[in-house]
Amino acid sequence: MIRKLTLALMMSGSVLAAQTPAFAQSAAPVSKLVDAVNIPHEKFTLDNGLTVLVHEDRKAPIVAVSIWYGVGSKNEPKGKTGYAHLFEHIMFNGSENAPGDYFEYTKKIGATDLNGTTWLDRTNYFQTVPTTALESALFLESDRMGFLLNAVTKEKLDNQIGVVSNEKRQGDNQPFGLVDYKRSETLFPVGHPYHHDTIGSLEDLSAASLDDMKNWFIDHYGPNNAILVLAGDINAAQAKPLVEKWFGSIKRGKQVAPVNAPVPTLEKDVKIVMKDKVPTTRIYRNWVVPGLADPDANSLFIAMSALGGLSSSRLDNILVRQEQSVVGVSAYLIPFVHGSLVNIQADVKPGGDADAVAKRLDEILADYIKTGPTAEEVQRVAASNIAQQIDGLEQVGGFGGKAVALAAGELYVGDSSFYKKELERLASAKPETVKAAMQKWLTRPVLEIRVEPGEREAYKEVAAGSGSRTGTLTAPAFYAPPGADDVSVSAPVAFQDRSKFPEPTSTPALDFPSVEETTLSNGIKVFFARRAAVPTVRVAVSFNAGYAADPADKRGVASMMSTMLMEGTTSLTSTQIAETEEKLGADVSVGSSLDRTVASLRAVKPNLGLSLDLLADVIKNPAFATKELERVRVQQLTRIKSENNQPQGIAVRRLPPLLYGAAHPYGGPQTGSGYAETVATISRADVSNFHQSWMHPSKAEIFVVGDTSLKEIKPMLEQRFGKWKPEAAAAPAKNFAVALPAPESKILLIDRPNSPQSLVLAGLVLDAKGSDDLLTLRAANEIFGGDFLSRINMDLRETKGWSYGVRSQINGAEDRVPFYMFAPVQTNQTGPSVKVLIDQLKDFNGAKPVTAAELEKTIKGNVLKLPGNFEQSSAVLGQMQADRLNQRPFNYAETLAGRYNALTAQALNDAMRVKVDPSKVTWLVVGDAAKVKPQLEALGLPIEMVTEAANTSASNNAK
């Protein structure tokens, strides 16, 4: 997708236009913002048909390497669903001249922003590498394009069938996880290339043969069906000989037959009711509309944004804020080549009348289609979207950077500058054009899906049981959260020696921006770093609060207060706040993490002053209106209920209190939402008092990164924050002296009947604080479980195929830090998977310590990826805040290369042995107890059972 915002819009809520605040009237015109969006590039084509696009961006010594193939799930015939994505997985399992896992090579060259994804219309592979490793990346991509087939084995295929099957189960296990299947098969008729989801069916995946995979490659993976984009520290003159060197000898592949699929229309309205483990009823309205090249798709994108995508959209204002009949709404368009999806959805307020909400939703939609959006609504859609596009220009690669914009346009419509034409359409759109598109396409028969709380039908598992789902109509499928049957295939003639991997030529130094410091007149410290690649400025006003500041009997108050700050000030309603943001192209948000509450701003440079006005008003002058508070309370209670219906939500709510104890600041749910019984008692006075005592000038620090200077920004901050005087005394420091419970090696089994997968979460509070030097311990954990190539992921995913992805991590925290292991695994291998994790941890600390090869890979990978890690100003801002939290100097990032190079295997072994004791780890398993408990009993650990009813009841949530 060319628009960076489309996936973000899926999560947006929204509001009807109110009177626009006066200080937003002088915002920079949209046309000025469009002028700032530009990706100059050159194009050339090799004799074998490979199209190459090169964009020069010298801000950092890195290059994005992104290759897009014109093959997706739309190319799959009946009986072979999921093959495009399955083959994407095969592409990471080694080629003839680069055997082994692809990530083994990308790690040692310092790649960042790397993955592979498959969707309806395409498959892509991407990584950002140091400039000195560009030839290494081109070798790897060309080798799997031209020299893959003799490296594909039955063993690899069987393993990846297991991995993909577990990827599917992991998604199916989520609330609403089965909706997309029903939506695809209903909206698109049998025979349409979009009739099935990208992830495919378990039956088809299990039946995939080695010949099937090899033929899929031969039929679709030729250079003439691919687009290579290089964006970053390179130009076309430098790129062309390197691309010719590595790709030029690959033979042209088969011509992929074009797909011709008209936009389908339902014969009549279709109504479907589904049951699921969900907190409340969700109502959907869906249509298929023209594909992304059609101007009507752009008009419908605007229509959906104004209806339910923007923070100021109509549905949010009417249904959420005014009538308060729903707790969340959204409307968005996802464009594809052969038809786009329009989705409108509303989550009914718990206990509400779903029929009445559905009727009201249809009334609002009918009126909107009849009258269309206002000119101001269209302008706000344009300004907010274009501002985010500008922000996206700072990234050269990844899943949303400049390489994506160029490749998508070239592949989908044959025009690499299509992103610019889309933005120009957006900026020049007229309300009457938007209305006409809605009247043409949204008056056709509609698909109505309603998902009600209840028990699902029994999950349909394949007989063999082999092996946030992606690979649906609304999200692509990713590679990673990121023998005797072999058929010999002749490789193309190679005129370039591939017998030796081209190692990076040198190690580029990280040039972290200098951080300047100053102090406002009331004592607030300001930290500034200049980054001028794009005309944007990021500001974070950070308070020493977070949900660790929640009183034990008021868990959830920090989260509630953070939400309430955006729900109105003494001079602006929540609608006016949202409209002002959108008009300015700004993004203001307030959120709490474990240790900090942060009010953030992303502003375009021309509107910086006005955006700071809005940020200051939100921070200093909240209204805390009672009506809004009660609405937010219902939303937070619904969120708690939703977390108790999600495996991961259950786990991160349940385990921390066991590890830290309920009285410890870290002893509440790690989602920050609190408990139903505590949230129910939080009063307006509680929220106001928390704001006055914790969002206090004495607890504030301001961080700024962007296209400005300290000389320019300080007076602006002084004007808005320097004279800020507190209305109450600051809260006392958090009490981290609370004694922790003794660690217990036991299993807490939470029953979730009919779960297609089990979730394992294990934890231990370490004798270490965030301010301690944890680099050595984290490097050891990277080898054990913190990386795709880690021991536990390679074992459970790549060797056994029991999981889509397994990780361990040492979380950051101001006080005592936890060690966690996270493993979603297939149900029939739950007990064996826990045993693998136990054995792996024991082996790591005992008979199988860190090897020389693991140490070298860890050091080299971490040093080489440093420039890529800090490409974006958001990463610089995050590092500055982390440095302050952990009491480090601001040049810490520049010391990392030397510190990594000084690591030894002995130091890593010692750090892990001292801090992580396998015999003290507490285990939590969420799954179908009838199937899982017998497996867990074989482990010999004490097991405590929690029934599904007990888990979801409010009375047990705080225990």
Image (cartoon, rainbow, N blue to C red):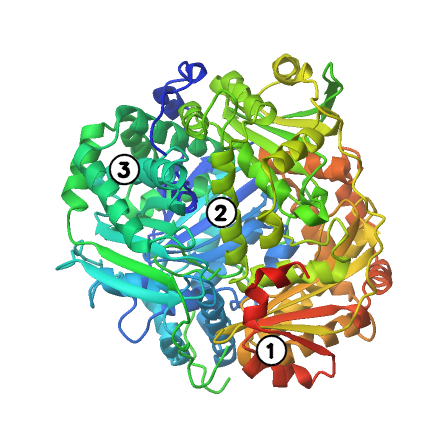
Of residue 86 and residue 606, the one placed in the foreground of this image is 606
Q: Which amino acid does label 2 sit on?
A: Val
Q: How far apart are marks 3 and 2 (CA)?
A: 28 Å
Q: Distance between the residues labelled 3 and 1?
A: 46 Å
Residue at the image position 70 percent from the left and 70 percent from the top: 923
For label 3, the residue is 303
Picture coordinates of residue 445, whole percent (x, y): 16, 54
* Closer mark to the observer between disc 2 and disc 1: 2
Q: How crowded is mark 3: few (under 14 residues within 10 Å), some or many (20 or more)?
A: many
Picture coordinates of residue 160, whole percent (x, y): 49, 73
Q: Distance between the residues labelled 2 and 1?
A: 36 Å
Q: What residue type is labelled 3?
A: Ala
* Location of residue 697 with respect to 765 vertically, above or below: above
Question: Which of the 4 quarters of the picture holds residue 867?
Answer: top right
Picture coordinates of residue 670, whole percent (x, y): 65, 53
* Location of residue 594 with respect to 578 vertically, above or below: below
- Label for residue 712? none
Q: Which of marks 3 and 2 is nearer the N terminus?
A: 3
Q: Do the residues labelled 3 and 1 touch (CB within 8 Å)?
A: no
Q: Residues within 10 Å of mark 1 (few under 14, many from 20)?
A: many
Of residue 404 and residue 56, the one placed in the foreground of this image is 404
Q: Residues within 10 Å of mark 2 (few under 14, many from 20)?
A: some
For label 1, the residue is 830
Whether residue 872 is visible here, answered yes or no, is no
For label 2, the residue is 634
Q: Which of marks 3 and 1 is nearer the N terminus?
A: 3
* Closer mark to the observer between disc 3 and disc 2: 2
Compared across the picture, whether 256 is left or right of 660 comes to left
Residue at the image position 36 percent from the left and 21 percent from the top: 19
SS for callout 3 = helix
